[in-house]
Image (cartoon, grey):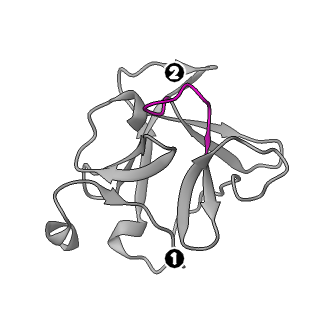
Amino acid sequence: MVSANWPQGEIDIRMDVYMCQAQQKWNISPAEGAGGYLGEPYFKITVAGTDRALAAIEGGELVSVPSFTGAPEQLWRIDQLADGTWRIMPKSIPGTDEKMALSAIGSSSATLEKFDPSSEKQRWIFNNP
C-alpha cells in the first residue's frame, strides 16, 4: 500500500493532472454527528482507503492530517452553485472568523480564499474516475 510510506504528520496539499494516484483519490462523506447547515450535513474529505483528512490550517492553507477527528477545521460545507459546480468551504479556519472557499492556485496548488462568484478557480466539479 502506497500510503504506508507517507509521512506520519501533516502533508501539504497539491494538485496535478489526474493520474489515478493514491493521493489523488478522495472520499467525501457525511461527518456523522457533526451537525450541518441549510439542510445538509457537514462532510469529511479523506484520502481514499485511509483516515487521512483534508484540514484547513491557520493562514488559510490546507493540509492532509493523519486522521479525521471531527475538529471544525476538518468539516466541510459543500454548496451547489447555479451553474452546477460546487463551492467547498471549511466550517472554520484556525486563527480567523473569515469565511473562505477552496481555491485553485495555477495548476499545482490549492488554498483557501474569500469566495469570488466571478472566479472559476473556486468552482469544483465532482467526477468518478
Indicate whether residue 99 is drawn in magenta. Answer: yes
| Residue designated by label 1 | 18
Spatial separation of the CA atoms under disc 1 and disc 2: 30 Å
Give the main secondary structure of the magenta stretch: loop
Magenta stretch in the rendered image: 92-101
Q: What residue sits 38% from the left and 52% below the top?
A: 63
Q: Which residue type does callout 1 highlight?
A: Tyr
Percent across and percent down for residue 109 are 53, 66
Q: Which residue type does callout 2 highlight?
A: Gly
Residue 1 vertical position relative to residue 117 in the rendered view, above or below: below
Residue 16 vertical position relative to residue 49 in the rendered view, above or below: below
Percent across and percent down for residue 85 are 72, 51
What mark, if any, has residue 36 been given in the picture? 2
Q: What residue sits 23% from the left and 44% below the top?
A: 67
Badge 1: how crowded within 10 Å, few (<14), some, or many (20+)? few
| SS state under label 1 | loop
Indicate whether residue 71 is drawn in magenta. Answer: no
Left or right: 70 as drawn, with respect to 120: left
Left or right: 30 as drawn, with respect to 48: right
| SS state under label 2 | strand
Q: Are marks 1 and 2 in contact (CB under 8 Å)?
A: no
Q: What residue sits 25% from the left and 48% below the top?
A: 51
Give the image quarter of residue 33. Answer: top left
Left or right: 2 as drawn, with respect to 85: left
Q: What residue sits 60% from the left and 57% below the top?
A: 126
